[in-house]
Amino acid sequence: MRVLHVIPSISPLRGGPSRAVIDMVAALRLQGVDATILTTNDHGPSLHPDLVTGRWQWHQGVPVLAFARWSPPVAALREFAVSPGLSLWLARHLKQYDLLHVHALFSFPSTSAMVQARWAGVPYILRSIGQLSPWSLAQSRGRKRLLLHLIERGNLQRAAALHFTSAAERDEAAALGLTSPNLVLPLGVHGPDSPAQPTGSSNTSAPVRFLFLSRLHPKKQLENLLEALALLQRHRPEANWELAIAGDGEPRYVAGLQEETRTLGIDVRCHWLGFVEGEAKWRALQAADWYVLPSAAENFGIAAVEALATGTPVILSREVAVAADVARTGAGLVSASDPEALALTLARALQRPSLAMRASAINLATMDFSWSSIALQLRDAYRQVLTSSAGR
């Protein structure tokens, strides 16, 4: 079975959905699926330094073919990331594949791939990476409504299946009235090289360590967390805590966040780690008492599950899809995302997580979000799609 995965970017700067494709393809290949990735050399504001263009290469253990991207000079269209070379390659080679797995909407590589798959008669699955949520559709609303009207609704309706990573993501998309079959299957995570063991802090005089590790973007609502911590400082001045902020984003936006910490009077307690990956990421997660993500919309929450895999409980807004699993298993705390409610939750967290909560965190990550198990289910879904398509 030859399956081509198409995504606009595999840059770690683009966040969890881009990173997950590499792990997904690697796990599928271990299950005997000939899975590969077609993408662009996008790297956020620049070009990916590790990707050559126009030829296959092994990248982080999987076959990747990348083409150059060109961003229109109009701000509203900049993320559309036109890639003529990618589109031309698809026209020449798409029929060599049994199935297409497309990741993302409203972007030239994804949109072009689905249109060409329809022309070529190749079935495709679409993972919308949360872009059908009300919050996401409200961003650049005019452009997205136009694209839905002109082309994306047709792409959605003719998909062999829509891949949602949580029931919550599927339910949010229901308002669009789509009739395509759907598949609810979470993403997986690879934990640290050393298996996590639930341990408590032996130094109760040390500050409680909160960690925000994510792409720095307004959707993540880091501003709410900063305001909540300012409220906590005002009402509990004796409390000993610190916040580590790991991630990167648009420079002007990041500078604004840093200025806000100074305005709120919490800058001395906030430590900016910048973008972290690999062992540095796992060390940051393991060093934290709590991972905090008060996002406005999150169709899954990969970094949150990575925190669970290290035995670090999480504090999540209800809009993070895995929050329901966290609440069900007692692997952390779930809070409304407004600063006042979040401040009350953070005050509870000053007690530090219990050993039982840390054990629940590890168990949830291990039992529900193992790539080996998820890849088996995805392989079976591919077979079902191909069987259904052959019968049409």
Image (cartoon, helix red, strand yellow):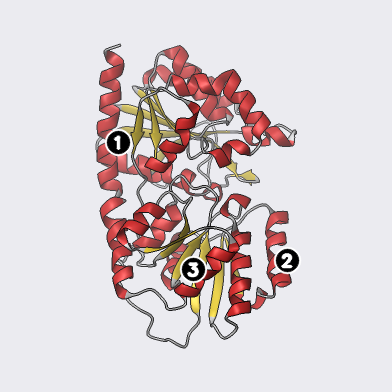
Work out whether mark 3 precedes mark 2 in sequence or the reverse, and give the earlier one: 2
Residue at 63 percent of width and 60 percent of height: 223
Residue at 63 percent of width and 78 percent of height: 234
In-image side of 275 versus 303 (left or right) = right
Work out whether mark 1 precedes mark 3 in sequence or the reverse, and give the earlier one: 3
Asked if 336 appears above or below 54 in the picture, the reply is below
Tell me if mark 3 has few (under 14), some (14-19) or many (20+) residues whose alpha carbon lies within 10 angstroms of its own.
some
Query: In the rendered view of the protein, which quadrant contains the N terminus?
Result: top left
Residue at 49 percent of width and 40 percent of height: 130
Residue position marked by numbered label 2 in the rendering? 259
Tell me if mark 2 has few (under 14), some (14-19) or many (20+) residues whose alpha carbon lies within 10 angstroms of its own.
few
In-image side of 127 versus 190 (left or right) = right
Q: Nearer the viewer, mark 1 or mark 3?
A: 3
Residue 262 placement: quadrant: bottom right
Distance, label 1 to label 3, CA atoms, is 37 Å
Residue position marked by numbered label 3 in the rendering? 345
Residue position marked by numbered label 1 in the rendering? 378
In-image side of 267 versus 389 (left or right) = right
